[in-house]
Amino acid sequence: MDLSFLKAKSFERTIRLVLTGGGSGGHTFPLIAAAREFKKIAQEKNFSLEIFYLGPNDFTLPYILKEEGIVIKTITAGKFNRADSFLNKLLGFVNIFVNFFKTLGGIFQSLFYIYILMPDAIFSKGGYGSFPVIFWGAIFFVPTFIHESDAVPGLVNHFSGRFCRRIFISFENTKNYFPQNKTILTGNPIRSELLPQANENYDLKSIKQLLGLSLERPVVTIIGGSQGSRHINDLILDILPKIIDKTEVIHQTGRANYKEIQREINIVFQEIVGNRKNQDYYHPVPFFEETTTPTISSLKDVYLVSDLIIARAGSGLIFEIAALGKPSILIPLPWASRHHQKKNAYLYAQTGAAVVVEEENLKTNIFSDLVLRLLSDEKKKKIMAEAALKFAKPQAAQDIAQQIIAEL
């Protein structure tokens, strides 16, 4: 067994943290945001800091490995999906059997890592991949802190909230699911590098030019979550002929869907639109990345130039959109666990910052009219932007990191 990742603690103060989460961008990126704040505090207070990640393998992990210098140790983890149809229930038995052994394997792997590392604290974003880590954290009495992103907590966080030291939540009403005396409303951790404050001297015209965008058209950005959304992709291809004359569209397709979208978009412009003159105003992107150089796939720059964002309703996306003060249309994932995206979306929309359209109500003509109507209504956009900024909690990652360090 390779133990080269383990360093002996020195006599100076050293804090060893373990981060864990469920295996998606919604878990990974808030962990990155918190890790950066932990590092800032360590520099300010002059103590040594070691950060490890224990959790399921996920395509977003290279962001941690490459950019953050965090030691990654992956474990197996089973995801138990709820069944709603007979076929799904039948397949569900197979799913339960397979994922039981995956979870069991993850528990044994986590036992080894937690015992060897014996961290000072565990910070969990919840999700199926965090259960084995939190389990051993409780057994070894490791101070465990959890963050619940969504309006309705997931099963793992709901369970672990009973014995963890502190619970951080994104939405006010979520406190009703946890012990009041250890629950703190912080918002969802977002990377400070995405915020306008980190780009105070930016010039919108210059950024648009660097991204190869026009200066005269409003920009609509579509984000289907970290892995993209096939349903949203189909919707965008349907409405594109109706909006492309008046807008510029940046579309995150998801890595798995990118090549298919490239093929289909040629058909859309050739056979449905009837010409390719507006194809230059459509920009498909596999995945938005965090880069220092302005490109059409740079999340920071795309956020800055967007006039309207169409997105799923994951908490991470909502709080990023809010912090940027961007009007949005939210399309909740209909089969999300415990309908948390739907509840996220409607709680956010109650502030006036967003419009919610459920997937079953997506009609091409109605949706395209909604997009164009919002883009042309400057008063409405201003009200939505102000409501978004009022809802935002850009200091969430900093507040969480400070609270955890203060309690160690």
Image: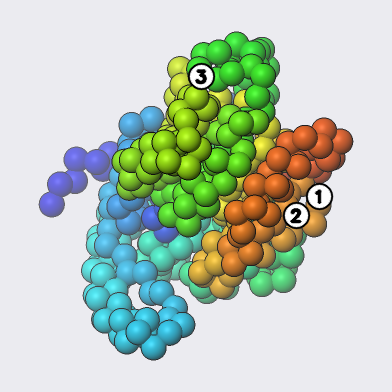
Tell me whether the residue at label 3 lies in contact with that at label 2, contact meaning CB atoms closer than 8 angstroms. Answer: no
Q: What type is the residue that disc 1 sits on?
A: Gly
* Count of numbered circles on the image: 3
Tell me the SS state at disc 3: loop
User: Could you tell me how far apart the alpha carbons at marks 3 and 2 are, in whole angstroms?
Assistant: 30 Å
Q: Earlier in the sequence, mark 3 or mark 2?
A: 3
Foreground residue, 277 or 177?
277
Residue beneath label 3, please? 211
Q: Is residue 167 above or below residue 220?
A: below
Q: Nearer the viewer, residue 148 or 10?
A: 148
- In space, the residues marked 2 and 1 are separated at their CA atoms by 5 Å
Q: Would residue 21 appear left or right of 400 to someone viewing this image?
A: left
Residue 119 placed where, x, y %? 40, 51
**Which sits earlier in the primary sequence, circle 3 or circle 1?**
3
Q: Residue at x 66, y 70 (%)?
A: 178
Q: Is residue 26 visible?
A: no
Marks 3 and 1 sit apart, C-alpha to C-alpha, by 30 Å
Q: Are marks 2 and 1 in contact (CB under 8 Å)?
A: yes
The mark found on residue 45 in the picture is none
Q: Which residue is mark 2?
A: 349
Three-letter code, disc 2: Ala
Identify the residue position indicated by label 1 in the image: 352
Which percent across, then down, holds residue 23? 39, 55
| Amino acid found under the numbered disc labelled 3 | Leu
Residue at disc 1, secondary structure: loop
